[in-house]
Amino acid sequence: MDSNSDPAETVTSSPKLPALVYLSLGSNVGDRKAQLQKASAWLAAAGRVVALSSFYETEPVEFTQQPWFLNCAVALETTLAPEQLMTSILRIEEEMGRRRVREKGPRTIDIDILLFGNATLRSLKATIPHPAMHQRRFVLEPLAEIAPEARHPVLQKTVRELRDALPQGQAVRKLQETAAPDLTDLHR
């Protein structure tokens, strides 16, 4: 998509060719690690999980009076259109017990579409690329682990460049006791 294109225009891959999508997953309620693993496994129903970052413990932002999050990034190949994927994601969140009681509040699972190939989309259901991803270290650290050269289609910067441009301040710690989960379990 060139820089003169309408930002509200949707550009997606052919329905027969999979698009590479990057997602951010987070949890701060219950067994956070188990929640991320379960959500990652359930995402395999929407496509093929091709990469999963390590887990990162992250300080809450905006609404800070809540437990710390565990976050990761997922690369998913899917033939679903962006809004179809969003519907699948919302279903996973609901089935995993997510209740939207307070905006930015505690949650069993939160799944956000960060990048959908080179697509841009602005609709009632989804905004792609995620409008705040370039400001969030808890998103960019895990994403840079699995896709440092992925390019933001609007800002025209790589994930690594976006991460490196962030100011200090958001606490994000990679968990050392666990490596990235084995993807073979996700493809069953």
Image (cartoon, rainbow, N blue to C red):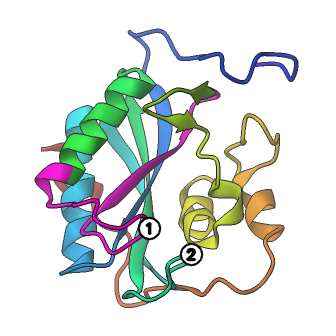
Relative to residue 171, is residue 94 depicted above or below? above
Say which quadrant the C terminus sits in.
Answer: top left
Q: Earlier in the sequence, mark 1 or mark 2?
A: 2
State the residue in front, 99 or 75. Answer: 99
The amino acid type, in three-letter code, at marker 1 is Lys
Mark number for residue 62? Answer: 2
Q: Alpha-carbon neighbours of circle 2 within 10 Å: few (<14), some, or many (≥20)?
A: few
Who's the residue at 71% across and 87% down the image? 169
SS for tag 2?
A: loop
| Residue closest to the eye, 42 or 96 | 96
Residue at the spot of label 1 = 104
Where residue 117 appears, as percent x and y from the top left, is: 58, 30
Q: Residue 182 carries which label?
A: none
In this rendering, the answer to whether 35 lies above or below 30 is above
Specify whether residue 62 is in view: yes
Distance (Cα) linking label 1 and label 2:
7 Å
Instruction: Name the dominant secondary structure of the magenta segment.
Output: loop
Disc 1 to disc 2: CB gap under 8 Å: yes
Is 27 situated above or below 17? below
Q: Residue at x 42, y 71 (%)?
A: 71
Residue 157 is situated, as x and y percent measured from the top left of the image, at 81, 47
Where's residue 124, x and y in %?
Answer: 47, 30
Instruction: Specify the segment rendered in magenta.
Output: 94-119
Residue drawn at x 81%, y 78% as measured from the top left: 167
Which amino acid type corresponds to the residue marked 2 in the rendered image?
A: Glu
**Left or right side of 73 for 97:** left
Residue at the right extreme?
4
